[in-house]
């Protein structure tokens, strides 16, 4: 398993560690950032720390979570406050890649917290998540279907700047404001008291500290209410340093939210304290790195080779050199053909793949094929319609994996295999698709019927029983005929599966399981078959398991 260096660059602390690619923390530490010295000095610290850790670990990449507005594509700081002088405009990715000779990915620290919680934290099962972080300032990140939404100019989720009662939220409900207000009330300098000490004093009954914490909660609740009403996420996760006081804060927050959010909305919005607390920035930075890496298969192959060069024998180095120079040859050759071309043994190629943790030569072939396709798709010099349409379709099909949980897909495969019969319900444009699906299932030997109008659906009522799966297809998710049949099917004990392009549609509220397909309006042209193709693609994933099982039975 590969290891990565992760840095969380904050205004007060610089946290760092070594993480494996599942998010496990192998080693971690922190030091004072000394942000007032400026961006150049901060990066010097990162380089010094990295040099030390790389003496003890084999590192595959550098993952950066940082304060400031970040262009995550180019790894550049678009804007940083005066707390970190000369940080604005720094090309962190470019500078650190040149220094470490390793790939680097950079993302905003608040976005990293949201990514971490969506990956392996409280929000890992949430379809939509807003992460609110409270520290020196207040930040936010919005994640829908496991995808970070940064907005048009990388400022999406900046909840700290919203105006409340003539001021900004972060000027009313941040830790810095809490310390400032308590110090002012007590007539002491701000550096004479910390947020932690304020909560300790409040627990002992200090009236000033209790009052100022309640003031913070009052305004914080207003910010959370704004998120709930405007974004309507399934979950709001609260992170940042202040959440170390969750036992004290959480009951106060929930009490205030009962006053600020209508009961029906509050009941349907999960309010949670972040799982990873101070480690979330590093974990999110790693996840961001892995996502960026997965979008660049060629870079991943070259990085894996470069990171393991020191392990390779002379013969294995010949293999590495050949692959780097002739990547397009790899997918079209067998392992014996490759061995002859490079003049090495097949067993040496197998050992080479294992050293790179690729697994097998077949896995290397798949990675190389993906890399070649990806390179062609991202070639900006080719602006033909062929490339544009192909890119649209690949993006849409990739979105299916993001929109749907793999656990749900596996569960449906299991239920689908057990079911004795399948009924398809859908109206309008779904009629043609249902017939195609029906004939495909018939080839697999699965009893199936399809109904595409109200009369047919009503006549099918007597067929419904607990041994079947009922699949409802509706792009809009509002087809009343299908929704009505779902209610009947559930009453008769049948399992119901809703497939639509609208995640809040009524069709999904009555379904035992729900799956989403991308909408056709995600591409520029109206003349496309995105909905049909993506629906076929999703259903083929389900049917593949049945086909595999049938093949095994024949053998």
Image: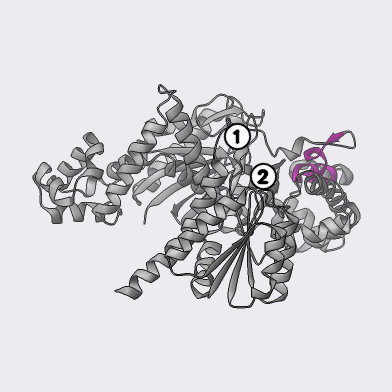
Determine whether, in the image, residue 88 is placed left or right of residue 542: right
The reply to whether residue 414 is visible in this rendering is: yes
Q: Earlier in the sequence, mark 1 or mark 2?
A: 1
Tell me if residue 13 comes above or below residue 206 in the rendering: above
> Is residue 168 covered in magenta?
yes
Q: Quadrant of the C terminus?
A: bottom left
Which of 335 and 313 lies nearest the eye of the viewer? 335
Which of 522 and 173 lies nearest the eye of the viewer? 522
Label 2 sits on a secondary structure element that is strand
Q: Quadrant of residue 39?
A: top right
* Residue 64: % across, % down: 51, 41
* Residue 485: % across, % down: 71, 65
- Residue beneath the point at 36% across and 37% down: 373
Highlighted range, magenta: 167-182
Label 1 sits on a secondary structure element that is helix
Tell me if residue 285 comes above or below residue 95 in the rendering: below
Badge nearest the viewer, 1 or 2: 2
Q: Which residue is mark 1?
A: 35
> Is residue 19 covered in magenta?
no
Total numbered labels: 2
Q: Which residue is mark 2?
A: 142
* Residue 111: % across, % down: 61, 43
* Magenta segment, prevailing SS (helix, strand or loop): helix
The reply to whether residue 355 is visible in this rendering is: no
- Residue beneath the point at 15% across and 48% down: 313
Residue at mark 1 to residue at mark 2: CA–CA distance: 27 Å
Q: Which mark is residue 365?
A: none
């Amino acid at each position: 398993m590969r290891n990565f260096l992760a840095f969380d660059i904050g205004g007060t602390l610089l946290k760092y560690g070594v993480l494996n690619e599942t998010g496990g923390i192998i080693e971690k530490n922190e030091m004072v950032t000394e942000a007032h010295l400026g961006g150049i000095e901060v990066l010097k610290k990162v380089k010094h720390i990295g040099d030390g850790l790389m003496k003890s670990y084999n590192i595959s990449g550098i993952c950066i979570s940082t304060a400031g507005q970040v262009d995550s594509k180019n790894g550049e700081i678009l804007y940083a406050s005066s707390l970190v002088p000369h940080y604005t405009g720094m090309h962190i990715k470019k500078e650190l890649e040149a220094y470490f000779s390793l790939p680097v990915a950079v993302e905003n620290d608040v976005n990293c917290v949201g990514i971490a919680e969506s990956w392996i934290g409280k929000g890992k099962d949430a379809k939509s998540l807003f992460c609110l972080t409270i520290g020196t300032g207040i930040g936010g990140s919005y994640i829908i279907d496991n995808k970070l939404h940064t907005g048009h100019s990388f400022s999406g989720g900046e909840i700290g700047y919203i105006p409340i009662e003539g001021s900004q939220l972060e000027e009313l409900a941040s830790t810095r404001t809490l310390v400032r207000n308590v110090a002012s009330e007590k007539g002491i300098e701000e550096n004479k008291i910390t947020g932690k000490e304020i909560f300790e004093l409040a627990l002992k009954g200090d009236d000033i500290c209790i009052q100022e914490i309640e003031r913070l909660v009052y305004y914080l609740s207003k910010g959370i209410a704004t998120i709930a009403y405007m974004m309507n996420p399934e979950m709001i996760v609260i992170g940042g340093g202040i959440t170390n006081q969750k036992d004290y804060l959480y009951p106060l927050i929930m009490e205030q939210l009962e006053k600020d959010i209508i009961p029906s909305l509050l009941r349907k919005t999960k309010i949670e304290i972040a799982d990873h607390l101070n480690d979330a920035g590093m974990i999110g930075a790693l996840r961001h790195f892995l996502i960026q890496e997965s979008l660049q298969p060629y870079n991943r192959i070259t990085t894996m080779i470069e990171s393991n060069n020191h392990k390779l024998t002379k013969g294995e180095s010949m293999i590495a050199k050949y692959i780097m120079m002739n990547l397009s040859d790899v997918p079209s050759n067998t392992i014996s053909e490759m061995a002859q071309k490079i003049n090495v043994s097949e067993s040496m190629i197998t050992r080479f793949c294992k050293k790179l943790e690729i697994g097998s030569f077949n896995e290397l072939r798949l990675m190389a094929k993906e890399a070649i396709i990806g390179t062609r798709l991202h070639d900006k010099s080719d602006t033909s319609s062929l490339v544009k349409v192909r890119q649209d379709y690949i993006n849409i099909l990739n979105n299916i994996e993001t929109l749907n949980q793999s656990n749900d897909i596996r569960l449906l495969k299991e239920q689908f295999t057990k079911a004795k019969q399948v009924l398809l319900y859908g109206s309008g444009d779904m009629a043609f698709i249902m017939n195609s699906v029906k004939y495909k299932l018939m080839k697999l030997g699965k009893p199936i019927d399809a109904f595409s109008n109200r009369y047919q659906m009503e006549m099918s009522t007597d067929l419904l029983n607990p041994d079947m799966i009922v699949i409802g297809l509706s792009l809009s998710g509002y087809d009343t005929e299908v929704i009505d049949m779902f209610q009947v099917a559930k009453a008769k004990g049948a399992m119901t599966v809703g497939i639509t392009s609208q995640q809040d549609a009524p069709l999904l509220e009555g379904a035992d399981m729900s799956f989403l397909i991308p909408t056709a309006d995600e591409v520029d042209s109206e003349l496309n078959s995105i909905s049909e193709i993506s629906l076929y693609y999703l259903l083929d994933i389900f049917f593949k398991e049945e086909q595999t099982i049938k093949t095994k039975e024949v053998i």
